[in-house]
């Protein structure tokens, strides 16, 4: 079986929207081991849709069609598919009754236009749509099978789970393909590639791929077979790749952000974090607080964009700013320590840098960022240092890219520095032309 | 002329990536009035690509093909297009010399594999690629014209500007279609629709469309004709729509964020803003500082996620927190005033709310947010109030949606409140089931 996806809707041919439904459908196809060979977008044009379906049947025998099932005159998918299959459309009383009941449940009468949604292609199986009015359809033809789904993502999701996946599972005898994932922060793609290279031969080169985003690498891997078998295989693959990547892996969940992982670690230890942000301007705080329940470990922070705020709110000495400049190791450390002590947190993070496009100099070019992580004072500290903090790590890095990328990478590296400290694992090699170095963890700094 | 777009690359058939190049190509087609009738994605398969091209020629006479021009064996676009056009590929010495020179300029010898990129379809026009090694091609066939572009966005962009657009301009005799845009913040789509409805008939219903995103509505409009003519028409349309929308329009530039507009207003007035964020956790600061040069008017802010930070850093009285709770009008106002006074800014914004999914109550359900904007004390204030602030506006709103949407909408409304104040225009109706109200602008609050 080979699949093709056709998304219908003139709005998908403009400059603003892409057919994102196809990504969800592709996931299901992958799970059941059906290769997707092509996808297409067509406008609300009956002839064009019918011709495109004829073409797609030359490439694939499973066609997944989304959109154009609404009640208005420009919704022509039903007609177009009927034409491509050389079948008639006929009014289905049961479907009409169902749509009427749906309107009635909202205390409304069904508008006349919605009667069109009760038209069914001869011989098609009707797929219930509990989340909307347009039913889906499945038509078996000598050239293959066509599924018609609504374009509304929530309605489509319901039918994928209720109709498409069970149908695919039956055809694959339960066998399929499933994806596993490991995410790594702030390491260059080449480093990740190098580390996992020894596993390529044993896991199958085609079953492992590396996807690089800014500051985040995803190692993806696939296993095929029946559900129990492929899950066991995925677990083995994950274990092997984790063995090679070590503590660089921060999660195996696609939807889990680094900030959530760090938050969990802090919560489990009963510890907390305060932030002092200059060039990132609140982005670190925004990421930390994107996680529900982050108030358990995040009292807050200071966006110290001006030097006056660095002095007044974080206690950064004016002399330090004058001598080293705002973008410097001593200032990053003093910001972190000020946030930690004044907000009463276990850890403090300070970020100060030149995000660009202006503000760079030969000594501190655009992209230069100083990050500091401080923690509780060392056990052996003298009593007069008790209110102080101990430097855990300072890094000076230079990120390539534009303002937003420099800022994003800074938040990512800050979180990764803390994650590694909380796990007690080593520091990381810097990204780009980083000149990072780890400072003595025991040095009192405030 | 009718156009079709074909993106080539097996990676575009996975679950992670969409063909975003097509959006950029569609813009150019729109500008020159060429309708896009379909788009498709094909894997790196010579036969499939050739068959898809044959099909697309039944739908369109201008085919824009991207991707698959690289040097490796899986880059088969050149071969596939040659096959569809029934032509040969031949090695082009000039192209090869150009690629060699490019490598030489980096002090490298051209790898043997890159010779493939010097293969040219018989009779094709070579399109220079100053940003990469793969040249583009233009082939004129009796069925129409095929452009082959690299899939790398920056390389594609260069060829669109240097080759595609001049070619389209010549064919359209300069006539084309251009888009104008007006952006409106924090008003419901229905309100925007209602206001511009009187202009539909005179501007042409099909020339105006309303696109709603969370907290932002885009009114788009199109004019056709020769460049000078359509630009004049666009200016007229913009003026008419601005007349109906009034000061609700914050920009006519697609890429300009509300935070940049507010920043410009502050800079022009020599004024500044400090932020006090609870539920948004730094997102407002992150948006303000996304604008280069924002240090001119943004000293910073406090992310006061915990009550202790609200007290210690912003001077919110503990009694106020105890009596009204952190999510309340008095606390939002005290946060704003604390930020304004302690950071020494002209204005202060305070945001405190229940972003969810937990933390809601009957009295303060999830989505409830209090926003306060304060400014300099009123002119008639007594001297002992001189350090205080005057409340400009307080709003209590309830945003529908998930945690991220509630937070985003909060930053958007905060910026819009300030923008309206800076322009001296009236307050806005709240979004969702907002219960916003404007408090007396003269009431001293700190």
Image: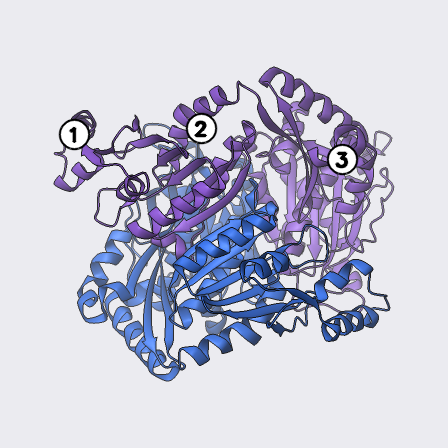
Chain colours: A blue, B purple
Could you tell me how far apart the alpha carbons at marks 2 and 3 are, in whole angstroms? 32 Å
Left or right: A159, with B50 as reference point:
right
What is the number of the mark on residue A418? none
The residue that label 2 is drawn on is A358
Say what secondary structure mark 3 lies in: helix
Say what secondary structure mark 1 lies in: helix
Callout 2 touching callout 3 (CB < 8 Å): no
Q: Residues within 10 Å of mark 3 (few under 14, many from 20)?
A: many
The residue depicted at 38 percent of the width and 44 percent of the height is A370
Judged by depth in the image, the label closer to the viewer, 2 or 1, is 1
Q: Residue B119: percent from the left, percent from the top?
A: 21, 35
Q: Residue B138: percent from the left, percent from the top?
A: 35, 30
The residue that label 1 is drawn on is B100
What is the number of the mark on residue B248? 3
The chain containing the residue under callout 3 comes to B
Quadrant in which the N terminus of chain A appears:
bottom left
N-terminal of the pair, mark 1 or mark 3, is 1
**A446 and B193: which is toward the camera:** B193
Left or right: A188, with A309 as reference point:
left
């Amino acid at each position: 079986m080979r699949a093709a996806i056709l998304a219908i809707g003139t709005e998908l041919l403009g400059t603003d929207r892409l057919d994102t439904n196809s990504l969800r459908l592709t996931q299901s196809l992958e799970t059941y081991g059906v290769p997707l060979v092509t996808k297409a977008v067509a406008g609300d044009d009956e002839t064009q849709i019918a011709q495109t379906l004829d073409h797609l049947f030359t490439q694939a025998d499973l066609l997944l069609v989304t959109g154009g099932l609404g009640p208005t005159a420009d919704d022509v998918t039903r007609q177009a598919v009927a034409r491509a299959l050389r079948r008639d459309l006929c009014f289905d009383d049961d479907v009409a009754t169902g749509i009427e009941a749906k309107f009635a449940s909202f205390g409304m009468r069904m508008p006349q236009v919605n009667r069109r949604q009760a038209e069914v292609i001869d011989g098609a199986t009707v797929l219930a749509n509990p989340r909307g009015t347009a039913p889906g359809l499945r038509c078996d033809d000598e050239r293959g099978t066509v599924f018609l789904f609504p374009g509304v993502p929530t309605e489509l999701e319901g039918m994928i789970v209720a109709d498409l996946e069970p149908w695919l599972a039956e055809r694959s005898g339960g066998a399929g393909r499933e994806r596993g994932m490991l995410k790594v922060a702030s390491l260059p793609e080449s480093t990740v590639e190098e580390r996992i290279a020894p596993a390529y031969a044993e896991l199958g080169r085609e079953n492992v791929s590396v996807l690089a985003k800014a500051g985040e690498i995803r190692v993806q891997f696939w296993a095929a077979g029946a559900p129990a078998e492929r899950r066991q295989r995925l677990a083995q693959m994950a274990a092997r790749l984790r063995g090679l990547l070590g503590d660089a892996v921060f999660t195996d969940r696609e939807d889990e952000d680094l900030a959530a992982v760090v938050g969990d670690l802090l919560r489990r230890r009963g510890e907390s974090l305060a932030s002092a942000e200059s060039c990132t301007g609140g982005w670190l705080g925004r990421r930390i607080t994107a996680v529900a329940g982050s108030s358990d470990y995040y009292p807050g922070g200071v966006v110290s964009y001006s030097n006056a705020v660095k002095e007044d709110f974080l206690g950064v000495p004016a002399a330090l700013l004058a001598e080293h400049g705002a973008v410097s190791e001593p200032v990053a450390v003093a910001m972190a320590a000020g946030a930690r002590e004044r907000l009463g947190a276990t850890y403090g993070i300070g970020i100060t840098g030149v995000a660009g496009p202006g503000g760079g100099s030969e000594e501190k070019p655009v992209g230069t960022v100083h990050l500091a992580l401080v923690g509780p004072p060392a056990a052996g500290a003298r009593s007069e240092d008790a209110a102080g903090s101990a430097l855990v790590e300072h890094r000076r890095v230079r990120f390539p890219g534009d303002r937003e990328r420099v800022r994003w990478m800074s938040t990512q590296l800050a979180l990764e520095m803390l994650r590694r400290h909380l796990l007690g694992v080593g520091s990381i090699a810097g990204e780009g032309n980083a000149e990072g170095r780890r400072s003595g963890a025991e040095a009192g700094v405030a």
